[in-house]
Image (cartoon, helix red, strand yellow):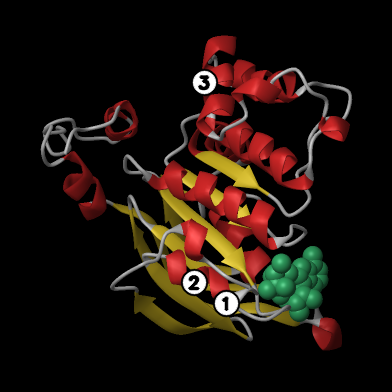
Amino acid sequence: MTASPRVHSFLSLRGDPMKYQPRHDAAVTLAEDIELVRLDGVAKSYGTGDLEVDALRGIDLTVAAGQFVVVLGPSGSGKTTLMNLIGGIEPPTSGSVVVAGHDLTSADDKALTEYRRTQLGFVFQFFNLVPTLTALENVALVAELVGASEALAREALTEVGLGERADHFPSALSGGEQQRVAIARALVKDPPVLLADEPTGSLDLDTGRQVLAALHRARDGGRTVLLVTHNSAIAAMADRVLRLGSGSLVGDEVVAHPVPPEEVHW
Ligand SMILES: Nc1ncnc2c1ncn2[C@@H]1O[C@H](COP(=O)(O)OP(=O)(O)O)[C@@H](O)[C@H]1O
Ligand SMILES: [Mg+2]
């Protein structure tokens, strides 16, 4: 097995170059040894008094690099809240969140902005593309933010199978294609962590599978993908499945034989 450039670039983000020196034949295994996400005693409440809602109640969790993790739970179980805490969008009420060596609990706004800009790719249910920009321009906009070239933006579109659609506006693309543009936009930063919140929630099965395949490929090379969904069928393609219920972690399984995204059914 050869190390992909992404393994190298990801590993180079880590603190200790001796410890994380990539070896060509062992890079992927090595990446899996790295603890990328760590939550200790994380709770999150919204509101106060009688109106207080406990969205998360004491989550302890570590996620290794290079895994495709599916977080399952019914509506209201705290999935989006979990994504927002790992994404540095909101602080926990108590506990600590550390991602890729960044302690988000003690970070100020400037550090959080920098963290989101450089360490994270976000994919949402409703693509959030800029309607007046082409697919390529949507991706290039983010590439520019992190100092990546337009050539890399093109490459990211090709990676999600949309090289031929670069000059289309979102309105001329199907839902699945728009979502793949959104994935390319997340990938162009080459982030160690990709967060996807119900990415197939508004797609039919066929286009949903293409989106899942693009996300699954994004995991290659040591990147961690956290996908939250209420659709339990998607769990079949995961390396690991976490279950949330009423703000608590109620399940954590390693999947022995994940199926390819093309075989996921719902
Ligand atoms: N900004 C907010 N203000 C108040 N309550 C919230 C807010 N965000 C989420 N909640 C509540 O927290 C709980 C978990 O929500 P959420 O994380 O969005 O769940 P899920 O994504 O699994 O549907 C729900 O009861 C929800 O109503
Ligand atoms: Mg949600």
Query: What is the CA distance from the residue labelled 1 to the residue labelled 2?
Result: 5 Å
* Closer to the camera in the image, 235 or 29: 235
The answer to whether marks 3 and 1 mark residues whose Cβ atoms lie closer than 8 Å is no
* Closer to the camera in the image, 153 or 245: 153
Q: Is residue 167 left or right of residue 154?
A: right
Can residue 239 be seen at all in this image of the molecule? Answer: yes
- Mark 1: which amino acid? Ser
Name the residue: 66% across, 56% down: 206
Instruction: Give the class, few, some or many, for how many residues have Cα within 10 Å of label 3's Cα (few <14, many ≥20).
Output: some
Query: What is the CA distance from the residue labelled 3 to the residue labelled 1?
Result: 32 Å
Quarter the N terminus occupies: top left
Label count reads 3
Residue 15 lies, in percent from the top left, at 26, 35
The answer to whether marks 1 and 2 mark residues whose Cβ atoms lie closer than 8 Å is yes
Q: Which residue is mark 1?
A: 232
Q: Which residue is mark 3?
A: 155
Instruction: Give the class, few, some or many, for how many residues have Cα within 10 Å of label 2's Cα (few <14, many ≥20).
Output: many
